[in-house]
Image (cartoon, rainbow, N blue to C red):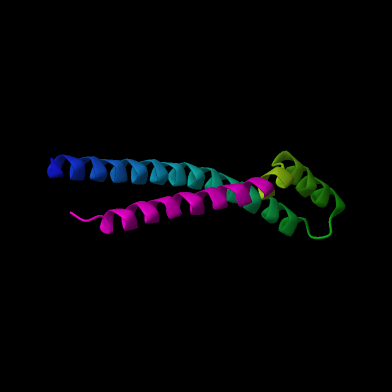
Amino acid sequence: MQSEVEHRTATGVVHEINNSVGFVDANLNVLQSYVHDLLDVVKAYQAAGKDPLLLQAAHAKAIENDMPYLRQDVDILVQECRDNLARVRRAAVNRLNTPE
């Protein structure tokens, strides 16, 4: 009986960790894409210097990459990653504090 309870507890912890890590991994993939887009825009502005046509192209690239949305979503994705990592930490600590 004790062994069955321990197994269910361990299975629950593994499930919680697996779900949270999967969520963080998915968010990191999106964040990687956002960083790539952001660096493309920065590169375009750096290359433009004071050339009005190149500045216009850089601005178009910023609009194309939807910088206002990207800035907002980055904050959300980072907070979601932090929240899920906190869930992993709580699950691990709870398991460590569970008497056997």
Name the dominant secondary structure of the magenta segment: helix
Q: Which of 68/11 is in front?
A: 11
Q: Is residue 90 magenta?
A: yes
**Residue 80 location (% of width, % of height):** 53, 48
Left or right? Give the position of 37 relative to 11: right
Residue at 13% x, 43% y: name it: 3
Residue at 76% x, 49% y: name it: 58
Left or right? Give the position of 90 relative to 35: left
Q: Which of 73/66 is in front?
A: 73
Q: Quadrant of the N terminus?
A: top left
Task: From this view, report whether residue 52 is shown above or below residue 3.
Answer: below
Q: Quadrant of residue 15?
A: top left
- Report how many numbered discs are placed on residues in the image: 0
**Extent of the magenta region:** 72-100
**Residue 67 location (% of width, % of height):** 71, 46
Q: Which of 46/33 is in front?
A: 33
Left or right? Give the position of 3 relative to 21: left
